Image (cartoon, rainbow, N blue to C red):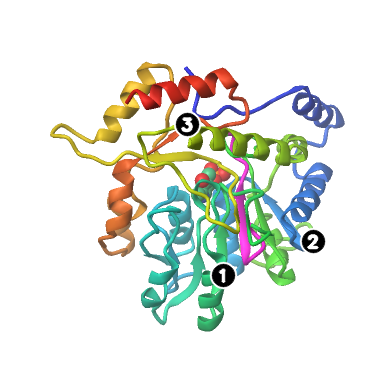
Amino acid sequence: MIPISKPLIGDAEKNAVMEVLDSGMLAQGPRTALFEDRFAATCGTKHAIATSCGTTALHIALLAHDIGKGDEVITTPFTFQASINSILFVGAKPIFVDIEEETFNINPDLIESAITPRVKAIMPVHLYGHMCNMDAIIDIAQRHDLFVIEDAAQAIGAAFNSRCAGSFGSGCFSLYATKNVMSGEGGMITTDDEAVAQRCKMLRNHGMQRRYYHEMLGYNFRMTDLHAAIGLVQMERLEEFTARRQANAAYLNSEIRNLITPKVHSGYKHVWHQYTVRMPGKPKDGLARDAAVKQLNEAGVGTGIFYPIPAHKHGYLRDYGVEAVSLPVTEQVANEVFSLPVHPQLSQEDLETIVTEVNRL
Ligand SMILES: *Cc1c(COP(=O)(O)O)cnc(C)c1O
């Protein structure tokens, strides 16, 4: 089976972990600090704050912007549920805005009419590694005095008009094992705002700046140096990983004939966290997409569906006062998408197998 994702772990990662083990300093320490510096430099931000995962990065980024009970956050329904859960964790409510069919990202044209007096922030999600239209989103945010908290979990290294994901507002990244740069588990917050950075550092460490002087309610959302060591090695190879993903995606785009293939809009640097195609159609028994995925899996081609159920459709949201809404583009696309392997470890033979099997659907 050609897997949908495969973490690239070499001797450098293994040696880096062994060095930390030998040093005896396992928890948040010098490797984490170095990883933060490298991350900030890569994203072009003044600060980067490492966390235990992407979800905790989102959680404390919201808190650091003083978003809580009674507040609302505009976001997309086509995302991993962590984006939504982080909003609920702080006691705020998500307001869902439908997506653009081509980029799968929040549709900026629909944002303004969704703004209520309680909306305090916009959380754009750069899905699959293609950034949202940040000109439009920043413009709306400035006119309505809203914070922008980017969920850049899938978009490390992505850019819009040469500016990196995570540098438009405060950015939240995930270093989960399947992400473009990974540390097993891990997260990062990027920001230019000194006060936000300080609050994030305190929130991740029990509200402390000085040991045992607790200035606010905080958490243990720290990264360990074991994870940071892996992330540091991976970070050095970001451009190489991205270039391979781009080459793989270009090949798939040029060879796949029978599906709606993904487009890259001009001005965007797509980092291809996922290569996602659409297969419309609803035969009598189930979705055409589901049949295609089954056929591909049987032929040894791994697939993923990100995400089969739109975020706003999960019933538990009603328990948090989030009303049911209808978002037609998202609901249609969720029935049609599936992702094919695009990761850096694919061989030319793998790519040819994928294309042959897809064109046979
Ligand atoms: C992976 C991911 C997250 C959560 O990150 P974790 O590190 O798994 O907590 C949040 N949002 C999106 C869009 C993601 O893909």
**Lateral position of residue 46 relative to residue 349, left or right:** right
Q: Are the two marked residues, 1 and 2, in contact with CB atoms closer than 8 angstroms?
A: no
Residue 167 located within the stretch drawn in magenta? yes
The amino acid pointed to by label 2 is Arg
| Nearer to us: label 3 or label 1 | 3
Q: Is residue 218 visible?
A: no
| Nearer to us: label 1 or label 2 | 1
Q: Are the two marked residues, 3 and 1, in contact with CB atoms closer than 8 angstroms?
A: no
Q: Position of residue 174 (x, y in %)?
A: 60, 46
Label 3 SS: helix
User: CA–CA distance between discs 3 and 1?
Assistant: 33 Å
Task: Kindly indicate the quadrant of the structure image that contains residue 296.
Answer: top left
Q: Which numbered disc flags the more N-terminal residue, 1 or 2? A: 1
Question: Is residue 140 positioned above or below 133 on the image?
Answer: below
Q: Are the two marked residues, 3 and 2, in contact with CB atoms closer than 8 angstroms?
A: no
User: CA–CA distance between discs 3 and 2?
Assistant: 58 Å
What is the number of the mark on residue 80? none
- Seen at 39% across and 79% down, the residue is 116
Q: Decide whether the magenta segment is chiefly helix, strand or loop.
A: loop
Q: Position of residue 307 (x, y in %)?
A: 38, 43
Mark 2 CB near ligand 1 (8 Å cut):
no
What is the number of the mark on residue 255? 3
Q: Which numbered disc flags the more N-terminal residue, 3 or 2? A: 2
Kindly identify which residue carries mark 2: 210
The amino acid pointed to by label 3 is Glu
Q: Which numbered disc flags the more N-terminal residue, 3 or 1? A: 1
Between residue 325 and residue 228, name the one nearer to us.
325
Question: Is residue 174 positioned above or below 84 on the image?
Answer: above
Label 2 SS: loop
Between residue 321 and residue 361, name the one nearer to us.
361
